[in-house]
Structures are given as structure tokens and as C-alpha cells.
Image (spheres, rainbow, N blue to C red):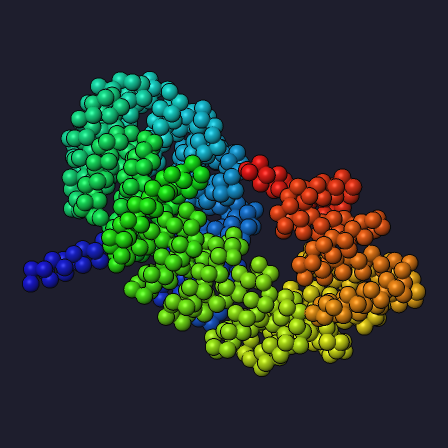
Amino acid sequence: MQRCVRFLLLFTLLFLTTSIRMPLILAQVPSTTGFMGDPIEAAHDHFHERRYAEAIKAYEELLENGIPKGGNTYAPLRQSQKDSIRLMLGQSYSKVGEDPAAQRIFREIIDENPDGSYATQAVHRLGNLYWQRYQFRQAVLQCQQILKQYPNTAAASTAAYLVGQYQHTEGKTEEAMQSYKYFLDNFPGSPYHTSAVNSLIRLYIANARYTEAEALIQKRLQRYPEDLMLLEQLAELYQQQGVHPRAIELYRQAIERDPGNTSLRRKLGDLYAKTGKTTQAINEWKKIVADETNQADQHQRLGAIYLSHKMYQEAIAAYQQAIRLNPQNGYLYTQLAAAYKIQGQNESAADVYIDGLQRVGLAESQREPIWEAMLEIYEGTRHKALQSKLIAQLQKQHLRQPQNPNVTMTLGELLFHAGSVSQALETFRKLHQSHPTHTDLALERYAEVLARNVSPRAADFYKALINGSSNRTRIRNAYSKLAMLYQKMEKWEDAVAVLKELVKNRQASIQNRILLGQLQLHGTREPKAAQITFQPLMTQRLVPRQLTEVQLGLGECHILLKRYTLAREVLEPIANRTNRYRATARKLVGDSYFFAADFDQALKAYNQVIQISKSDQLTNDALEKIVLIQNHQDYLKIPLTDYAAALQLYLSGKTEEALQQGDGIFELYPQSNIIDDIWFLMGNIYREAAKNTEALNAYQQVIASESPIAAKALVNIAEIYRQQDDFENAAATYATLITDYPESVIVVYARQQLDEINKRQQKR
């Protein structure tokens, strides 16, 4: 009953207090919770919901007409309402970037009543227009103008304070100090007085103006002897001057008045430590954590304090005690290890990390921070001995405790980070049956680490996840990521096989099916199979992006299957719309004409690609075809027609037929300009088939004829050498390219690769 009475009394008091203050609140900060139909509140709602254009319109209508009463009658605004609305109108203009309109309104409010409460707010808003754009000088000039125009007013008081603040922010220290002094001397009753004093004191101390700082503090203390902040500032002042006994005395005085102030105790402890009084420092710091209900947190906080003061033995003892009380907190192990690591005791730090990994459990959130810290000392050739020692230690422990999941997981992680990826994977597999979820996450995490470096071993981790997990979603994701890994590695058949398995299991997403079609089209070069993949998707519910990707895929399939008219029926609608696929579709339209030997129409389409494409690759492809068509007009373009047929055969996966077509061109048109392009195409075919000797020979033919595409041939030769780890020949080829073809756009790429090869050779 007493509790209910107390609640009612409290509620009544709150209601009365709110009722008394409500007019002031409404006058200064327009409410957003008014009743429905209130036009002022409706305007405020526009502002607070960031509909600034609507807010401006609503505010201007209110200022012009007043508050609608019904029909064509309006009630005039009270002055406070008018000022409040104008202030909000100015803010609305500033939000939409119409600063001149905002400045005009704020100045009107100030000019009409510079002593009014809204004038002080308008001064703030006016200065803020410049301050938020880092135009501090303009903000200062505006405030100085108000100060000069309306001296001894509320607006002038605010302006004078802001001048110092803006100068301080701008880094004009001397000017800021003078402005704060002027403000304090001329506006002693301002609500910003205390703030200005504190700012001025901080500036004095920061600029070693200790005498002036002390005089100001002492003057304030005479007026406010109980002000703890002033005592603290005076203590800091003496501390900076090296008068430590006096600083300590002042800190203690402040603490006696406020024993629960942990900030003061921390500063006093810091000063004790600085002056060599370690025992007193520790006593003060222990008092800081005395009220902590959780003892582990107490020791953790003490450990952090000790560590920050390089008191390593004390920090170690505190963290060890915290760990005894909370052994599953991974953060404690990283901090304890840090105390060892800072002293160069890496083996002790490593022991702490290993201990932590075995005690925090299998959750990634606890293990990952420990590994992030540990890798700083664990990886690299300098620490091979430490790696070997830790692995041997864990392997023995694993033999003793083969069923301990924490030991098994830690051993697997150690092996992985030491580069023993196969052993790590085998260790994780042992854990899979008993702890499937955590092992799934570990396999997934390390598979992604390997995949980022395009390591073939990532595939083994994804396969282990697929074979060992019981989570259908995770299995489906692993299939998808495995397919994308094979795509990066250009293992097209493996990628296609993985995606087909997803389709067979009825787990393939729309995006999986689209990727399958694209890989069949551009990877394994099976346009007929790609069409069979794409076609059923046209009956599915696709988002616009997916639908366009499917249509582009189908269009390209039709081109390679020589259905040129059908291809254009699919591609033209995309090419004629404004969308990000427009240039791709237009380029494919050009290809449909090119392979049909309608080179004039192909030129038109490729030129349109150049006009609309923002993709360098698309632009380059179109430019290459344009140059090809324009430079090969011999024999009524018959050699060019035969070249287009060879290229189409190659893109359709019919490589032997493409090579035969190339040989036929050599026999029929040995003097044609197209010969270099045929050699280059044959080089690409051989290179893709891993027939490097034949590929190198074909590219050398291009270089020997001093063809315009010789630079591209040199790049491909260098890439073959790199794939064979023949870095000496690769570097020499890149150097030749840079020297002989300095104007080629490929030179930038060649320089990058040459630098990379040189760095790799230096590491050997």
C-alpha cells in the first residue's frame, strides 16, 4: 500500500513539474507528439521525418496565414509560435543546402529581439551553418558582427562565447584565449560562463601558461570552493609543473569530498606510480575496483592499469587471478600473453595462448581473438622452432586425451597455421562426428582463408564440409563456394560438375543455375548445354537482374549456334533500354553480325558500345573488333570471314576444327593481313590446351612479323613462363615488352608483374 502511495505522489509531482515547464519546452523545442490535425505539429513532423521541402512549405504557409480555424478563417500566431516556426524554417533551409535563406531568417530573429531566447538560438544556428562546413573564419566574422551590432544583449553574449569556441576549434589558440577572457569579463551572468572558464583553463595549461591558469582557478575557487572540477584542474596544473606533493594533496582533498570518484583515484594512482610510490599507487587502484561485485572484473581492470604502467609482474598476477575466476574469457588470455610478449617472452606468451584455446571452448567468438593475437608470434620462418614445439606438445596431449574436443580443435588449428594443411584437415575430420556444428564452422572458416589465396587445398576443406555436415544450408553454400573456387582456378569442368550435382540434388538456387550456364558457355565452351541450362529459367520467377543475365546467356548461345536472327530478337530489347547491361547486349549484337560476316552492321554496333560502355573490357573488346574489321579488307574480306568462322569454332569448344580452319587460311591466304591474328588465335587455343611449346611458337610468329598485336603476344608468352615457374624468362619477356613497346597500354600491367617477380626472387 505504501508503495502505491509513493508511486501516486511521484506521478503527481512529475505531472505538475511537466505542466509548469511545458510552455518553455514548447517555446524552445517544437514537439513532435501533438494531436492529429494540429498544423504546427504536422509541419514539425515533416521536419523530424526529414521531409524538408514539405516542412518549408508548411512553415511558410503558417507564417503567412496563421493557424487555420476552418473555412477561410485563420488565427494569428503568438510571437513565441512565430519565432519557434521561423527557427525551424531556417533549420529546414539549412538541411536542403539553401544557406542564404537560412541566414536571412536567423538574422531576422536576431535583429527583431537580440535579447530574446530565440535570438540566442538563432546565433547558434547561424554560426553552425559555417561551422559544420569547417568555415570557422566565416563563423567567427558573423559572431563578431552580432557582438558589435548588439552589445550587452543575450545575442551578443552567445556570440562572444562562440567566437572563442570557433577560434579554439580552428587552432587559433592565442585568439581563442583572448576571446574567452573578453567573454568572461563582459558577460559574467551568461549560462556559458562555466564552460568558458574550463575551456580557458585547459588552453592555459596546454600552452604552459601556468600562472594565468592558477590565477583563474584560484579566483573561481574563492567563489565556488566546493567545485571538484576546479580542484582537479589545479592538481593537474601542479602535476604538469612537476610540483607533485601539492598535486597529490589536491587530489586527496578532492577524493575526500567524493570518495566514489574513480577517475580521481586513477589519476592519483597514476601520479603515485610516476613518482615511484608503487605501494600507494596500487592501494589507490585497488580502491577503484573495490565496489566491483564480480571479482574477475576487478582483477581484469587492475591488470589493465598495471599493464598501462609497465608493471608487468603485477599485471601478470592480476590477469592470472582473473583467469582462475573466469577461465572461459578469451580476452583475459590475450592480455596476459601481452604482458609476456611486451617483455620478449614469446614462449611464455605462446603457452598462455595454447592454454586459453583449450579452455575457452569451441565457439569461434572466443577462439578467433586469441588466434589473431597469437599469429603475431606464431607465423613466419623466425618462429618455426616455436611452431614445431607447440605442435609436438599438442600431439602428445592428443594421444593422452583423444576424446578431448578442445585439444583436438587446437591441434588442428596449430597444424593449419603452420602450413600442414592436410594434417589439419584430417584432425578436423576426427572432430566432426562428435562436434559437428563447431567443426563445420572451422572447416568453413579455413576453406575461405585458402580460397582467398586461390589455393587448391580449399577444395578439400569444402569437400570435407559437404561430406561431413548434416546442415543442408551449409552443404548447399559449400557446393556454391566450391564451384566459385573452381571458377577462379579456371577448372571449368570441375566447377560445372559441382553445380550439376547441386541441380541433381534439387538444391541449386537460381543464381547457381545461371552460373552453371555461364560456365558452360565461357568455361567448358558448350553453347548447346548452356542453352539447355538457361532455357528453363525463362519460365521461373526471376528478379530483373537475373532475367537479363539469362537473356544475355541465351543470346550468346544463339550466336555460337549460328542462330543470328533469334539472337538479335533476344538481345535488341536489352540493348535499347537504359540499364547496366545495355553495352553488353549491344556488343553481343555486334558479334551476331560479325560471325554472320555482316561486317558493316557489326562496325555500327561496336561503335555504339564504345559510346555507352563504362567497362574497360567491353570497350577493349569492341575496339579490337573494330580494328580487326578496318585493317582486313583484303580479298573481299574473305580471309576475315574465315577468321570469324575459326573464332566461332573456338568459342563453341570445337578447338580441333578451329585449328584446321586456321591451317586452311595459312594455305589459301599466306599474304593476308589476317595471318597474325590467326597465329594469335591458335596460340590461345594451344595455351588453353596446355600445349605450351606449340603456343609459344604461335606467339613467336606474331612477334617475328612485327604485328600491331605483338605486345599482346609477349604478355601471353610471359604468362606461360610464369605458370611454369620460369621466372627468369618471364621477367626477361616483360622487360622486352616494356622496352620495345613503351607506348602500349599493356606496359603498366607488365611493370606490375615484373615488380612482383623481382620481389618473389628476392625472397628466395
> In the depicted view, which residue is nearer to us: 44 or 714?
714
One can see residue 206 in this view:
yes
Residue located at (33% from left, 51% from top): 411
Residue 724 lies, with reference to residue 403, above or below; the image says: above
The C terminus lies in which quarter of the figure? Answer: top right
Residue 75 lies, with reference to residue 209, above or below; the image says: below
Report x, y in % for residue 469.
38, 67
Residue located at (67% from left, 74% from top): 527
Report x, y in % for residue 700.
78, 51
Report x, y in % for residue 134.
51, 39
Residue located at (22% from left, 44% from top): 323
Left or right of residue 452, residue 3 in this image: left
Q: Quadrant of residue 342?
A: top left
Report x, y in % for residue 763.
55, 37
In the image, farthest residue toward the right:
635
Residue 380 lies, with reference to residue 48, above or below; the image says: above
> In the depicted view, which residue is nearer to us: 536 or 217?
536
